[in-house]
């Protein structure tokens, strides 16, 4: 089998999708787990809210709460990504579609399967975000 050379743009697009998925997961479920560990209320994993958990902005794991702390920036951007799930998921699906089209055109079956996997992950995350649980999580993150 002849290995095809992938373009730098294709690799960056694939890496951008995985980075967006990781950022969304950190901004939604990562912050939720940190808040649950901090509060000690493990039932809040299934029922997030201000009454059970504190404000999500105080869930930065280490350091001081100022603009000079890089963790504040990382978790702030991740939280913003989780709050803006609709445009982020749409962008992820579009990137996945472009990657799948390029893989199909190039005959790279493995890359096509990975692109389709990322599209499915985005659709599942989008569906979870619009479930009642996802709505509760989104309302807690937006406070």
Image (tube, rainbow, N blue to C red):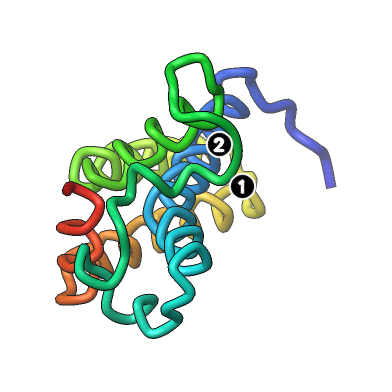
How many numbered marks, from 0 up? 2
Instruction: Look at the image and tell me whether residue 62 can be seen.
Output: yes
Query: Which element carries disc 1, helix, strand or loop?
Result: helix
> Does residue 68 lie above or below 41 as drawn?
above
Task: Report the mark closest to the observer, 1 or 2.
Answer: 2
Q: Position of residue 29 (x, y in %)?
A: 43, 60
Position of 78 with respect to 135 (left or right) is right
Q: Tell which of 4 and 52 is nearer to you.
A: 52
Q: Tell which of 58 and 26 is nearer to you.
A: 58
> Does residue 47 lie above or below 53 as drawn?
below
Q: Where is residue 47 in the image (x, y as percent from the top left)?
A: 27, 79
| Residue at image coords 63%, 53% | 109
> Does residue 57 lie above or below 126 as drawn?
above
Separation of marks 1 and 2 at Cα, in angstroms: 9 Å
For disc 1, the neighbor class at 10 Å (few under 14, some 14 to 19, many from 20) is some
Q: Determine which residue is flagged by label 2.
A: 14
Query: Which element carries disc 2, helix, strand or loop?
Result: helix
Q: Are marks 1 and 2 in contact (CB under 8 Å)?
A: yes
Indicate the quadrant where residue 42 lies: bottom left
Position of 80 with respect to 11 (left or right) is left
Instruction: Look at the image and tell me whether residue 104 can be seen.
Output: no
Upstream in sequence: badge 1 or badge 2: 2
| Residue at image coords 59%, 33% | 63
Residue 111's tag is 1
| Residue at image coords 50%, 58% | 34
Residue farthest to the right?
A: 1
Q: Where is residue 14 in the image (x, y as percent from the top left)?
A: 55, 36
| Residue at image coords 43%, 60% | 35
Q: Tell which of 17 and 110 is nearer to you.
A: 17
């Amino acid at each position: 089998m002849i290995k095809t050379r992938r373009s730098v743009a294709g690799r960056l697009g694939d890496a951008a999708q995985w980075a967006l998925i990781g950022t969304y997961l950190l901004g939604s479920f990562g912050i939720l787990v940190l808040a649950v560990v901090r509060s000690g209320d493990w039932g809040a994993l299934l029922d997030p809210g201000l009454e059970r958990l504190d404000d999500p902005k105080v869930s930065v794991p280490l350091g001081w709460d100022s603009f000079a702390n890089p963790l504040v920036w990382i978790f702030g951007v991740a939280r913003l990504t989780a709050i803006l799930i609709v445009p982020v998921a749409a962008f992820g699906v579009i990137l996945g579609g472009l990657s799948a089209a390029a893989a199909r055109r190039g005959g790279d079956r493995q890359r096509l399967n990975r692109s389709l996997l990322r599209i499915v992950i985005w659709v599942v995350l989008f569906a979870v975000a619009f479930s009642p649980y996802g709505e509760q999580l989104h309302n807690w993150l937006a406070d």
